[in-house]
Amino acid sequence: MLKTSNLNLNKPEGTDTVNIDDLNQNADIIDSKFAGSAGHKHTGAAGDGAPIPIAGIDAAAKTTAGGAQANRLAVTNSSGRVGDAEKVGGQTLAQVRSGVTKSDVGLGNVINYGVATQLEAEAGLSSTKYMTPQRTRQAIDTFAPVKSVAGKTGDVSLTKNDVGLPNVDNVKQATKVEHDQLNQTVATHLAEDASLTKKGHVQLNNTVTSTSTAQAATANAVKQAYDKAVASENSANGKAPLKHTH
């Protein structure tokens, strides 16, 4: 347990058990220090050095020697002499009497909210209450537990069927660079025409008279050419045509 430097009062630390005897001892020490000061009086004159008993501070602070209302507060300075406090917290006493605001004590941005109750913390609806660590933990304990996932409980392992995606393959989406490269490849392939020396795209030709070397004959054109060739051969050999009428 610590002790004060002037009156040797007991100062329990955070880990100490508070004992009523320690408090009573402090009270006895303070009472004994003021036992002999009852006879001292203050004239009200600034800086006269006379000690002021506790019971007489209010009266001494309110009046001057002539009995008129004072505009200054009588206080004891570090030398034990009574002086006058012209300002408190950077304000004149007139300003202090008119009311100190939260900005005057460096709390201008702090909203005057109370602390949420456990029910308010668990409800999570109030926007005008502060949350302590205890209230935050209570709210988390209320909302955190998951009863079930996709109808499963316990140590759950989900599949794509559980989330409504049975037909979706687990493939990586192409990047924009890959997508652009594929588009370029397809465009290049579509522009490749076939020739006598390379493979590529060809246009069909349904005639039997074309001499193109970049187009492909249809099955119908080939059949017509075949029939004409057979008819010519039969005619040359004196045979009847494949198709004739009577």
Image (spheres, helix red, strand yellow):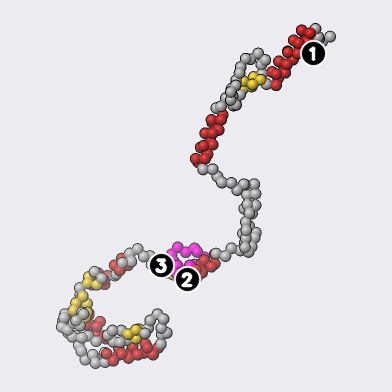
- Can you tell which mark lies on residue 134? 2
Instruction: Describe residue 25's horizontal placement relative to residue 226 as left or right.
Output: left
What's under tag 1, amino acid-wise?
Answer: Leu
Q: Which residue is mark 3?
A: 113
Residue 156, placed above or below residue 190: below
Which mark is first along the chain, 1 or 2?
A: 2
Residue at 24% over, 72% down: 88
Instruction: Give neighbour class at mark 2: few <14, some 14-19, many 20+ (Cα, 10 Å).
Output: few
- x and y percentages locating residue 86 in the rendered image: 20, 73
Residue at 63% over, 15% down: 210
Q: Which residue is mark 1?
A: 242
Separation (CA) of disc 2 from disc 3 = 17 Å
Of residues 223 and 196, which is closer to you in this image? 196
Pair 2/1: label in front: 1
Whether pointer 2 and pointer 3 mark residues with C-beta atoms closer than 8 Å, the reply is no
Whether pointer 2 and pointer 1 mark residues with C-beta atoms closer than 8 Å, the reply is no
Residue at 28% over, 92% down: 32
Residue 132, placed above or below residue 194: below
Residue 122 visible within the image = no
Which mark is first along the chain, 3 or 2?
A: 3
Q: Within the image, what quadrant is residue 71 found in?
A: bottom left
Of residues 211 and 77, which is closer to you in this image? 211
What's under tag 2, amino acid-wise?
Answer: Gln
Quadrant for the N terminus, please: bottom left
Mark 1: which secondary structure? loop
Q: Is residue 134 in the magenta section?
A: yes
- x and y percentages locating residue 205 in the rendered image: 64, 19
Instruction: Describe residue 40's horizontal placement relative to residue 180 as left or right.
Output: left
Which mark is first along the chain, 1 or 3?
A: 3
Mark 3: which secondary structure? loop
